[in-house]
Image: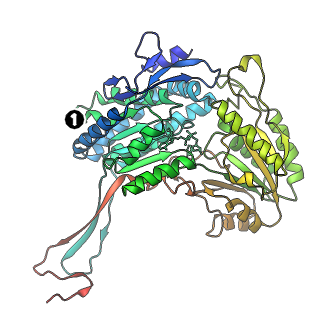
């Protein structure tokens, strides 16, 4: 099956399907000159092939090519750039099934979620096409007579995208489709755990560009490599914007490197997302939302539910029912249609999960259910786990950190203000939710003294955002906003223009200069 999926997407270059390029541009694929990287599927540990990473010298030539491409791309009208994105959206529609299968194969997501991720790519293409005719600036009243002020939004320059393994296509597409309509070429360094998804997306761009002769060749380039390649991109003064998605420690390094050269970074980092379940909540709705948010993608979403803050009057009813749901979860091969929980990405993720459960117990937590490796012959080679629930005090240090695995910490509260304080009392600030039917509680939660996160939901889980809103989080999550709303402004250069159409030269603030 793996060969069929890879071949259908046209990313296999050699007859034995064992080697892929490390660097891909329009219409050509160059073999990376760096170290070889062996790829394995998290489903069964089976070998997918070898990818050649890029060398330092190759990254430099990619950056130069992106800058040359920028000089051409910025002159192509934005609606024409939108037309390219429209055709990209059509190409993704046509290949939705195969791309979804590739995400499942390479990242272990269940197929339904993988298809949802490709749909997200298609949706952002549609959004970006509309945006290509709406890159509006303001006209501003001037304080001087016979003067006019206005704002213009111009293309910014090459954008580097550094992406995480768990959303191998969606996060890239938020950056790429918006960047293209804004007039910026892309250099994409995907996660070294998901390079095939990147090569498949790049192939679609290459094929689509064949119909767009006036577009520069290097509008989109992929470089396969590790954090060092990411650092080289972050350090380059020829890349005005570095958009990086991943863990908080990675974001700190990228932010420091980019800030040292006074560049712009857009950071989408780890979350430690909480849901408050109030005494008035619709428990049936809440249970469904908790399970999907906490175990979807095997707890490997940035927006995964990690902390459940339940009112003391309902916790003894809710917790056993939640544990029952957990015990009946179908865990298995992500291609199997009944599976709801696929594998962890690798053994390291499994070890981190075990370590966090151990620490939680040392810190007074009680393991309510789950946490074991699923030992079935047909799942050997993959790291399949039972999602875990740990009952714990909110002061335990372990609840301050994100463990990228399905562990749900459950804690109790008495007053709504206390629940909000517990929710906000962590370094991260990505996603949050409240389940309540009490208007005062929900409005308080959404108010300026409520949730301090970038995403705050009422009667909806923490994971599963729509592309139309700006996505991102506060505090250690990095403060970036991508995808919808006015996130496009991050990808453009704002110019304030003042025009004097009179015969005098009055100064601002009424200054008289002789
Ligand atoms: P990671 O931090 O290990 O790697 C992310 C990317 O950063 C990879 O491409 C990696 O090669 C690169 N990288 C690593 N060190 C670097 C360095 N020093 N300089 C430049 N680049 C470097 O993360 P991961 O394990 O792939 O993904 C999981 C993490 O990503 C979680 O913390 C999750 O919450 C976060 N995430 C956040 C969002 C969001 O939108 N906020 C979305 C997806 C994932």
Residue 437 spot, x, y in % from top left = 75, 60
Q: Quadrant of ligand 1?
A: top right
Viewer-nearest residue: 210 or 161: 161
Examine the rendering and report whether any part of residue 469 can be seen.
no
Residue 290 spot, x, y in % from top left = 74, 46
Q: Is mark 1 within 8 Å of ligand 1?
A: no
Viewer-nearest residue: 150 or 393: 393
| Colour convention of the picture | rainbow
Residue located 49% across and 40% down the image: 163
Could you tell me how many numbered marks the image carries?
A: 1
Residue located 56% across and 26% down the image: 106
Examine the rendering and report whether any part of residue 13 can be seen.
yes
Q: Would you name the residue on which mark 1 appears?
A: 214
Q: Quadrant of the N terminus?
A: top right
In this rendering, position of residue 194 left or right of residue 273? left
Which residue is outermost to the left? 503
Residue 203 spot, x, y in % from top left = 39, 26
- The correct choice, above or below, for 244 with respect to 3 in the image is below
Viewer-nearest residue: 262 or 333: 262
Name the quadrant containing residue 222: top left
- The correct choice, above or below, for 317 with respect to 355 in the image is below
Secondary structure category for the residue under label 1? loop
10 Å crowding of disc 1: few (<14), some (14-19), many (20+): few
Q: Quadrant of the C terminus?
A: bottom left
Residue located 30% across and 42% down the image: 81
Which residue is outermost to the top? 15
Residue 291 spot, x, y in % from top left = 74, 42
- The correct choice, above or below, for 221 with respect to 48 in the image is below
Residue located 22% across and 35% down the image: 214
In this rendering, position of residue 43 left or right of residue 213? right
Viewer-nearest residue: 351 or 510: 351
């Amino acid at each position: 099956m793996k060969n069929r999926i890879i071949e259908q997407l046209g990313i296999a270059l050699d007859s034995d399907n064992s080697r892929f390029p490390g660097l891909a541009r329009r219409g050509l694929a160059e073999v990376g000159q760096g170290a070889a990287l062996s790829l394995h599927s998290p489903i069964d540990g089976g070998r997918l092939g070898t990818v050649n990473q890029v060398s330092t010298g190759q990254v430099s030539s990619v950056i130069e090519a992106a800058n040359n491409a920028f000089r051409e791309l910025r002159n192509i009208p934005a609606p024409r750039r939108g037309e390219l994105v429209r055709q990209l959206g059509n190409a993704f529609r046509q290949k939705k099934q195969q791309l979804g299968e590739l995400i499942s194969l390479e990242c272990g997501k269940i197929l339904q979620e993988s298809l949802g991720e490709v749909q997200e790519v298609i949706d952002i293409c549609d959004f970006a096409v509309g945006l290509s005719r709406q890159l509006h600036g303001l006209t501003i009243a001037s304080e001087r007579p016979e003067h006019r002020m206005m704002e213009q939004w111009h293309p910014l320059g090459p954008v580097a995208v550094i992406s995480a393994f768990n959303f191998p296509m969606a996060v890239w597409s938020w950056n790429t489709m918006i960047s293209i309509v804004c007039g910026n070429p892309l250099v994409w360094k995907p996660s070294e755990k998901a390079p095939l998804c990147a090569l498949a997306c790049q192939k679609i761009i290459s094929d689509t560009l064949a119909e767009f002769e006036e577009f520069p060749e290097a509008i989109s380039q992929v470089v396969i490599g590790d954090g060092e390649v990411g650092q080289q991109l972050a350090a380059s003064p020829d890349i005005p914007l570095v958009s990086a998605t991943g863990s908080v420690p990675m974001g700190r390094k990228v932010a420091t490197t980019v800030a040292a050269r006074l560049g712009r970074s857009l950071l989408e980092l780890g979350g430690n997302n909480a849901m408050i379940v109030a005494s008035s909540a619709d428990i049936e709705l809440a249970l469904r939302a908790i399970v999907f948010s906490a175990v979807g993608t095997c707890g490997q979403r940035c927006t995964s539910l990690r902390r459940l803050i339940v009112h003391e009057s309902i916790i003894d009813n809710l917790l056993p029912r939640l544990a029952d749901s957990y015990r009946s979860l179908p865990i298995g091969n992500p291609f199997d249609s009944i599976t709801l929980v696929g594998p962890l990405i690798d053994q390291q993720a499994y070890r981190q999960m075990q370590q966090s459960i151990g620490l939680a117990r040392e810190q007074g937590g009680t393991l309510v259910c789950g946490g074991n490796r699923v030992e079935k012959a047909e799942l050997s080679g993959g790291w399949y786990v039972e999602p875990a629930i740990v009952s714990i005090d909110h002061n335990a240090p372990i609840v301050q950190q994100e463990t990228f695995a399905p562990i749900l910490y459950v804690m109790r509260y008495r007053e709504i203000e206390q629940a909000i304080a517990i929710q906000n009392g962590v370094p991260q600030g990505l996603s949050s939710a409240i389940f309540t039917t009490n208007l005062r509680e929900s409005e308080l939660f959404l108010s300026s003294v409520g949730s301090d996160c970038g995403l705050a939901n009422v009667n909806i889980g923490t994971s599963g955002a729509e592309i139309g809103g700006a996505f991102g989080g506060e505090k250690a999550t990095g403060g970036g906003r991508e995808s919808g709303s006015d996130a496009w402004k991050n990808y453009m250069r704002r110019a304030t223009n003042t025009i004097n159409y009179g015969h005098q030269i009055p100064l601002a603030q009424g200054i008289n200069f002789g």
